């Protein structure tokens, strides 16, 4: 199974910035992030594929930026202008061959993002 290692989670004051990183053990096509807040279901946040196509959830558009390295095995999620609603567990997801994250087949362990006043 492909390993996805997440890093960068932590606490940030509302309005502040945080960067999440996901590193895959092999080259992937689509990579990105989902998140789950307390009492909520897991929701899509952002993705990027081998063509460089990016997709953002409407709730984070203009505030979060996803990018990848040239080897296509690492993605960063730059989170700016954070809201209380951005808090939760963030999960890296990926597909090795598929260019979207509609149905990810690889998942990371998750990293927690907390938003303070």
Image (cartoon, rainbow, N blue to C red):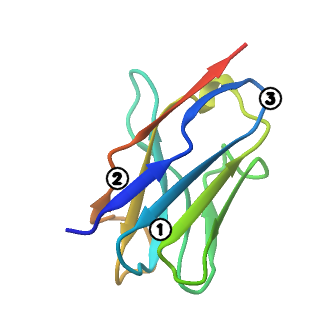
Q: In which quarter of the image is residue 92?
A: bottom left
The residue sitting at 61% across, 65% down in the picture is 55
Who's the residue at 46% across and 64% down the image? 23
Q: Look at the numbered discs 2 and 3 and tell me whether their residues touch, using CB distance below 8 Å.
A: no
| Residue 75, x across and y down, in percent | 56, 65
The residue tagged 3 is: 15
**How far separated are the C-alphas under marks 2 and 1?**
11 Å
- State the mark number for residue 31: 1
Which residue is nearer to you in this view: 69 or 61? Answer: 69
Q: How far apart are marks 2 and 3 (CA)?
A: 26 Å
Q: Report the residue that reaches farthest toward the left.
A: 1
Q: Nearer the viewer, mark 2 or mark 1?
A: 2
Marks 1 and 3, how far apart at CA: 26 Å
10 Å neighbourhood of mark 2: few (<14), some, or many (≥20)? some
For residue 108, which numbered disc appears in the image?
A: 2
Left or right of 88? Residue 85 is right
- Where 9 sits versus 58, above or below? above
Q: Residue 38: where, in percent of width, then height?
A: 42, 22
Which x, y percent locates residue 39? 38, 21
User: For this rendering, which residue is in front, 87 or 73?
Assistant: 73
Chain-order first, disc 1 or disc 3: 3
Say which mark, if any, is on residue 63: none
| Badge 2 vs badge 1, beta-carbon distance below 8 Å | no
Quick one: label 2 or label 1, which is nearer the N terminus? 1
Q: 63 above or below 114?
A: below
Q: Compared to 14, does 73 lie above or below? A: below
Residue farthest to the top?
117
**Under tag 1, what secondary structure?**
strand
Nearer the N terminus, badge 2 or badge 3? Answer: 3
Locate residue 106, reporting x and y percent.
Answer: 29, 63
Q: In this view, does 8 lie to the left or right of 95?
A: right
In which quarter of the view is residue 113 placed? top right
């Amino acid at each position: 199974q492909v390993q996805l290692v997440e890093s960068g989670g932590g606490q940030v004051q509302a309005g502040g910035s945080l960067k999440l990183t996901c590193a895959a053990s092999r080259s992937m096509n689509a990579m990105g992030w989902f998140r789950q807040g307390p009492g909520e279901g897991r929701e899509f946040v952002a993705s990027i594929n081998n063509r460089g196509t990016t997709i953002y959830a409407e709730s984070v558009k203009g505030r979060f930026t996803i990018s990848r390295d040239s080897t296509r095995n690492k993605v960063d999620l730059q989170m700016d202008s954070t809201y209380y609603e951005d808090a939760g567990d963030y999960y890296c997801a990926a597909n090795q061959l598929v260019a979207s994250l509609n149905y990810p087949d690889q998942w990371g362990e998750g990293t927690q993002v907390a938003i303070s006043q």
